[in-house]
Image (spheres, rainbow, N blue to C red):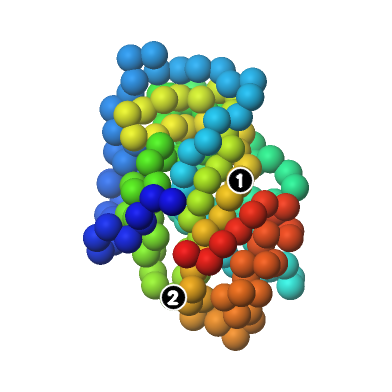
Amino acid sequence: MADLNGGPARPLGPMQWGEEMQGQLEPDEWEFYAEAIQSWRAWRAVELDGVLLLQSITYRDIHWIPRQELVADCKKNDNYKRDYPHCAPSIRHGCGIYSLKNAEDVNFWKNYPTPTDTIIYGRSSIWGNVFKYTKGYISQYAYPSYLFTPANVGVELKHTVSAEELRMELSRTYVVEAEIA
Ligand SMILES: [Zn+2]
């Protein structure tokens, strides 16, 4: 397993968060994947109506539903969206499902936005229309494929689950392997 503790995580400003983290576009910038490829990302674990769910770190209203693929949807609310209705992912608008090529790059996400959150990281299967960058991808579909759960649960969930219960519960509901990292 890759070493994911190679240095302190630093907080990210909004401009470093999205597209800039993906690096530069690859020369063959787009590909359609009928079969999933693997990438890395991070989530926030939250409890909703008694169910532990993986939530987007940047969008509090996006939840990765267990046993159902996440489908890209344009969540940006700006002039571009109003003037140019489009499908997601959109390379011009930068909307879609973000993930990274290397586990090491997920370090930047691990303590974002606050240490009170319970941050899960791991691999994600991505497929469909995929834009390729030097450091990551923006995809049409995604589903978690392997989870690393924290040894210490964040303040928000601390009174709800232990670290081992969190690992077991996420593994069971998402039907993926999970280990405490
Ligand atoms: Zn868009």
Residue drawn 48% across the image and 38% down it: 39
Return the residue found at the far top. Answer: 28
Q: Which mark is residue 145?
A: 1
Regarding residue 96, the answer to whether it shows in the image is: no
Element assignment for label 2: loop
Residue 88 to residue 142: above or below: above
Q: Position of residue 112 (x, y in %)?
A: 38, 61
Q: Which mark is residue 17?
A: none
Residue drawn 68% across the image and 67% down it: 168
In the image shown, does 46 or 177 lie closer to the viewer?
A: 177
Quadrant housing residue 127 = top right
Q: Amino acid at mark 2?
A: Thr
The residue that disc 2 covers is: 116
Return the residue found at the far front. Answer: 1
**Left or right: where does residue 59 sit relative to residue 10?**
right
Residue 1 to residue 139: above or below: below
Residue 85 to residue 116: above or below: above
Q: Position of residue 88 (x, y in %)?
A: 55, 29
Regarding residue 40, the answer to whether it shows in the image is: yes
Sequence-wise, which precedes: disc 1 or disc 2? 2
